[in-house]
Amino acid sequence: MAKKVNLNIEIVAYNDISELSESDRNLLSLAEDATHRSYAPYSNFNVGAALLLENGEIISANNQENAAYPSGMCAERNAIYYAGATYPNEKILTIAIAARKGEETSFIPISPCGSCRQAMLEYEVKQDQPIRLIMKGHKEIFELHSISDLLPFKFTQKDLFE
């Protein structure tokens, strides 16, 4: 007989940025700053990401669009791939994401697209340690303990060899 199974994902919701640590506020600020350097002439949807590495380095990146879709790249993947290429042995502790349309901050916390989720999960599995995710909206900020929470039925390198 079939049974229903519930999946539980813990999300910490903050009502104000002042509730976050100074480090997390700084990371979100850098992600927001990165939105102003994005290249999004087609969607006008500017996304910024900032990563905190274990060695204290912070990497920020933004989305880059291209008239030849899908040649553009999301902010999250730009940041995580740069981290992997530049600091291959450093673990990623936290990723912060912010977005805006024009000059308006996204009302709801912006969640990474499917491709970014999978790319971030690859690094989480590779480093064998969770990567915290902070997503900023105009009114709320969401925090997840792990990228795995975004992909409850994840596909990883372990699935290729079992």
Image (cartoon, rainbow, N blue to C red):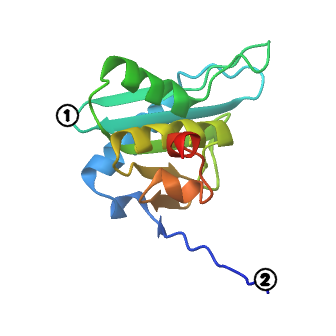
| Amino acid residing under circle 2 | Ala
- Quadrant where the image shows the N terminus: bottom right
Residue 138 visible to an observer of this rendering: no
- CA–CA distance between discs 1 and 2? 48 Å
Q: Which residue is mark 2?
A: 2
Crowdedness near tag 1: few (<14), some (14–19) or many (≥20) residues, C-alpha within 10 Å: few
Query: What secondary structure is marked by label 1?
Result: loop
Position of 52 with respect to 42 (left or right) is left
Position of 108 with respect to 92 (left or right) is right
Q: Which quadrant holds residue 29?
A: top left
In the rendered image, residue 86, in percent from the top left (x then y), is placed at 33, 18
Q: Name the residue located 78 percent from the left edge and 22 percent from the top edge.
A: 42
Tell which residue pokes out farthest to the left in this image: 55
In the rendered image, residue 85, in percent from the top left (x then y), is placed at 38, 18
Nearer-the-camera pick, 71 or 138: 71
Name the disc covering residue 55, or none.
Answer: 1
In the rendered image, residue 142, in percent from the top left (x then y), is placed at 50, 60
Nearer-the-camera pick, 157 or 90: 157
Q: Name the residue located 53 percent from the left edge and 21 percent from the top edge.
A: 37
